[in-house]
Image (cartoon, helix red, strand yellow):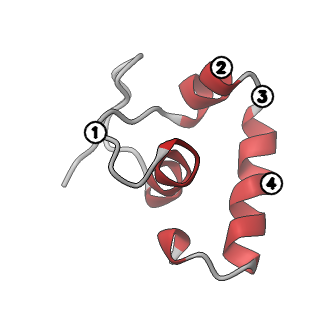
Amino acid sequence: MRINCVICGKEDLDKDAIGINKKLLGIDITNYYCMECLAAYLGCTVQELFDKIQDFKDEGCTLFK
């Protein structure tokens, strides 16, 4: 399944982008953001999102396997 960014239209978001959307916005979301648009939406940097993804992976979160 191909998932595109609801804001900028970036196509085929990767599994980490999809995972962080679900983790931060809710597992049942239907609109997804690319990393850049998600960072803007949340008021943080893309690097901060990547850091959180790594933290969640280290914790064994199943959204990032």
| Label located before the other in sequence (3 or 1) | 1
The reply, left or right, for residue 27 in relation to residue 62 is left
Which residue is under mark 4? 51
| Label located before the other in sequence (4 or 2) | 2
> Of the numbered discs in the image, which one, if any, rests on residue 40?
2
| Camera-side residue of 60 and 37 | 60
What is the C-alpha distance between the residues marked 3 and 4?
Answer: 11 Å
| Label located before the other in sequence (2 or 1) | 1
Q: Is the residue under label 1 in contact with that under label 4 (CB below 8 Å)? A: no
Which residue is under mark 3? 44
Looking at the image, is 23 positioned above or below residue 5? below
Q: Is the residue under label 2 in contact with that under label 4 (CB below 8 Å)? A: no
The crowding category of the residue bearing disc 2, from other C-alpha atoms within 10 Å (few below 14, some 14 to 19, many at least 20), is: few
The crowding category of the residue bearing disc 3, from other C-alpha atoms within 10 Å (few below 14, some 14 to 19, many at least 20), is: few
| Camera-side residue of 51 and 42 | 42
Is label 2 or label 1 in front? 1
> Of the numbered discs in the image, which one, if any, rests on residue 30?
1
| Label located before the other in sequence (4 or 1) | 1
The crowding category of the residue bearing disc 1, from other C-alpha atoms within 10 Å (few below 14, some 14 to 19, many at least 20), is: few
Residue 30 % position (x, y): 28, 39
Badge 3 element: loop
What is the C-alpha distance between the residues marked 3 and 1?
Answer: 22 Å
| Camera-side residue of 54 and 11 | 54
